[in-house]
Amino acid sequence: MRSRLIAVGAAACLATVFAGYSTTHVGASTGPIPLNCDRACLEDVMNQYLAAVVAHDPKRVPLSEDVKYTENAQEMKVGDGFWKTAAGQGNYKHVFADPEAGQVAFMGTMQEAGTPLLLSVRLRIELGRITEIESVYFRSGGGGPNNIAGMEQAKIEDIWFKSIPPAQRPSRQQMIATADGYFTGLQKNDGRGIQGTGTYPFTNDCHRIENGSPTTNVPRPANAAPGTINLFSMDCLSQFKMGLYFVVQSIHHRRYPLVDNERGVVWAHTVFDQGTVNEGVLSTGEPYKYPGFNRPASILVTEAFLIESGKIRRVEMIGPGVSYHLNTPWPGGLSGN
């Protein structure tokens, strides 16, 4: 009888421990997300999240009690910051899903104070609750190439939505290696290829959009002087081969939390350090200078890479200016030094 009472007591104690763990780590006022959350499920979670932000009500989404939330790398409580100022969803909405890793991400426009802004947000889901929210905002006046109004009216190209047959899908490691090659080739860009190989991972029609503004393949101005370099009129490969991005001295805290294997997309977070070097020599031997590019500063970058056959075909980026050599509160990542 005594041993039976001890066993019952032990079981009750264990039940209390596990109940306490559940309450502490995954308690929420809404029902849990299905444990086998597929693409449609993850997209629905993102829709719920954006609607909750606009409603200024975190209780509308199933949050973990210990959810980690950041805005432009600043950690804060869910419900603070943009949760208090969001005025509506925008027209541009690009969602990426990674059921294997329990990750979903959004890149698009939102409304605040009567004007659109750009938002990237990544959600991580564990045990039916949102445990991580990493959001990055680019607002008007944020500097650099940008066209928020243009992104608000833009249409997402159909190539982003192609479903790759399972047998043709590269591994996560292969896709991440391709995306990381972009940053390796961009950091202290010298035109010699990744680690001197002479090659960069781009398709011939690679195109990049940064903060809503095309930064490749832009028609050259009719009044441009012959022989002058027009950076944004070039394609991705030509820019890198010429070594025009020598100004980017370090790309650190590289992370690749989401791989949309079905559609060939890698979602990346990183920090660009620049402004300490504004003069260099291009691969053609020609000296080149960026006027006024002489203040240390960084860019908090979110980048989505569309990859086909091991090469980058499209790049979409949101990146506000931040303090020089920002150290993000998100752990892990590859060093750019």
Image (cartoon, rainbow, N blue to C red):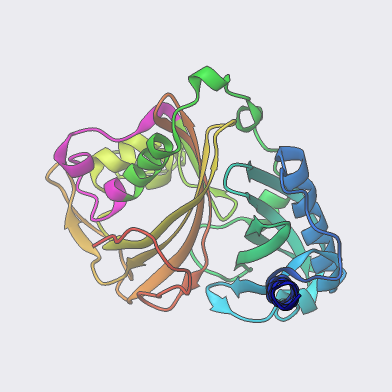
Which quarter of the image is occupied by the N terminus?
Answer: bottom right
Magenta span of residues: 184-205
The one of 308 and 152 positioned closer to us in this rendering: 308
Looking at the picture, how far across and down is residue 330, in whole percent? 48, 69
Q: Is residue 29 left or right of residue 168?
A: right
Vertical side of 11 occupied by 150: above or below: above
Figure check: 30 above or below 105: below
Q: Is residue 192 magenta?
A: yes
Outermost residue, left direction?
285
**Of residues 42 and 247, the one drawn nearer to the viewer in this rendering:** 42
- Nearest the camera: 94 or 211? 94
Q: Residue at x 34, y 35 (%)?
A: 237
Residue extending furthest toward the front? 1
Q: Is residue 162 above or below residue 219?
A: above
Quarter of the image for the C terminus: give it: bottom left
Q: Does residue 136 show up magenta in the picture?
A: no
When the figure is inspected, residue 307 is found, relative to residue 3, above or below; the finding is above
- For the image shown, how many numbered marks are present on the structure? 0
Q: Quadrant of residue 75?
A: bottom right
Residue 327: percent from left, percent from top: 40, 75
Q: x, y (%) of residue 307?
A: 47, 32
**Residue at left 51%, top 61%?**
319
Q: Position of residue 329 (x, y in %)?
A: 47, 74
Q: Quadrant of residue 230?
A: top left
Residue plotted at (63% across, 25% down): 162
Residue 225 seen: no
The residue sitting at 32% across, 41% down in the picture is 239
Q: Which image quarter: residue 22?
A: bottom right
Residue 295 in the figure: left or right of residue 82: left
